[in-house]
Image (cartoon, grey):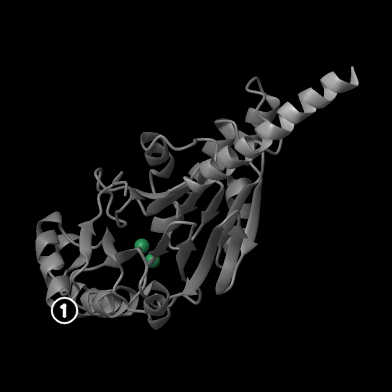
């Protein structure tokens, strides 16, 4: 009896390193990919949803911003519809948060039972409380009516952050970078470091020294751009609009200088504040500043 047990035990022990090897091999191959869920601006372009970007590391999904249409794009990208691992908001402008109620409530209706981990600037807690108050009747009917959704499954755990590392778990480190977005007191870009990739998402910003430093030498820089001299929704630019652009956003000339200095391996343009027809001109303007890396004009559902 004892001999059999030992033989069985030996068998188990011999198999263990293989199991461990497989486990460590599978965690090593959790390569990182980015999915552009929404590359648009406030203009409701059917081809470009509101600002939202997913960074996928193995089975974990980190979502950056929640613009209009975000859950439709999450579904189209075949990412989990019952909630991301965590949501990171760059700033509280509506074109980056109008899909926040969608993320909170749709993920609950689609099966979320744990609190949504939501990170962002101060004011995010009040926004969250107001969203839950606005949908109070819906929450009541879905919980206590015939749908029998999980009680409190809509809950959100808000983290109001400051600059620096805001998330560090399982090999993924996310750092909030203070950026300069006009009169917003608090606006962030994010740097995401995973076991195999470094990625920076700019959020909305005029050229920001902190963002340039954080993006230096990264694998991927995903940056907003508003072509120099462009007007609002294709209209001729007024002096007031040009001033707004200068204080709140980054022109193609400025992005060219920033990309040349930071030299990311790949530059992805998103939150593109201009007509599709000027995309080629924007790319050549960026290159004319000296940037020699790969440039991708981001489209919704691009994956790289
Ligand atoms: Zn924006
Ligand atoms: Zn903004």
Q: Position of residue 7 (x, y in %)?
A: 78, 24
Figure quadrant of the N terminus: top right
Crowding around mark 1 (Cα neighbors within 10 Å: few <14, some 14 to 19, many 20+) is: some
The quarter of the image that holds ligand 2 is bottom left
The percent position of residue 82, horizontal first and vertical second, equals: 54, 36
Instruction: Report which quarter residue 252 is drawn in.
Output: bottom left
Q: Position of residue 113 (x, y in %)?
A: 66, 36
Residue nearest the viewer, comparing 101 with 26: 26
Label 1, ligand 1: CB separation under 8 Å: no
Relative to 75, say whether 4 is above or below.
Answer: above
On screen, 30 above or below 278?
above
Q: Which residue sits at x=17%, y=72%? A: 286
Locate residue 165 relative to residue 251 in the image: left or right.
right
Residue identifier under label 1: 289
Residue 273 screen position, x and y as percent: 24, 63
Considering every residue shown, the one lying at the far top of the view is 1
Is any atom of residue 91 visible in this view?
A: no
- Residue at coordinates 21% horizontally, 75% vertically from top-left? 256
Q: How many marks?
A: 1
Answer with the quarter of the image where residue 158 lies: bottom right
The secondary element bearing badge 1 is classed as loop
């Amino acid at each position: 009896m004892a001999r059999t047990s030992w033989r069985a035990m030996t068998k188990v022990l011999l198999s263990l390193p293989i199991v461990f090897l497989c486990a460590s091999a599978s965690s090593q191959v959790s390569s990182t990919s980015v999915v552009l869920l929404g590359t648009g601006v406030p203009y409701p372009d059917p081809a470009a949803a509101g600002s939202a970007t997913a960074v996928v590391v193995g089975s974990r999904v980190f979502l950056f911003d929640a613009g209009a249409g975000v859950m439709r794009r999450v579904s189209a990208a075949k990412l989990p519809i019952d909630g991301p691992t965590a949501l990171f908001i760059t700033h509280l402008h509506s074109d980056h948060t109008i899909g926040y109620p969608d993320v909170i409530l749709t993920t609950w209706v689609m099966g979320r039972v744990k609190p949504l981990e939501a990170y962002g600037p101060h004011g995010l807690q009040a926004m969250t409380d107001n969203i839950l108050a606005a949908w109070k009747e819906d929450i009541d009917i879905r919980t206590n009516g015939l749908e029998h959704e999980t009680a409190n499954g809509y809950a959100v755990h808000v983290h109001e952050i400051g600059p620096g590392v805001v998330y560090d778990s399982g090999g993924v480190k996310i750092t909030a970078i203070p950026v300069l977005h006009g009169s917003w007191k608090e606006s962030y870009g994010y740097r995401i470091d995973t076991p195999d990739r470094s990625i920076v998402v700019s959020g909305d910003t005029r050229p920001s020294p902190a963002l340039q430093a954080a993006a230096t030498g990264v694998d991927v820089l995903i940056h907003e751009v508003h072509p120099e001299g462009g007007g609002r929704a294709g209209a001729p630019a007024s002096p007031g609009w040009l001033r707004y652009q200068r204080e709140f956003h980054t022109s193609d000339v400025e992005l060219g200088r920033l990309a040349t200095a930071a030299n990311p391996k790949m530059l992805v343009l998103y939150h593109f504040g201009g007509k599709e027809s000027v995309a080629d001109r924007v790319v050549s303007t960026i290159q004319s500043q000296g940037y020699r890396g790969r440039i991708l004009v981001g489209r919704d559902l691009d994956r790289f």
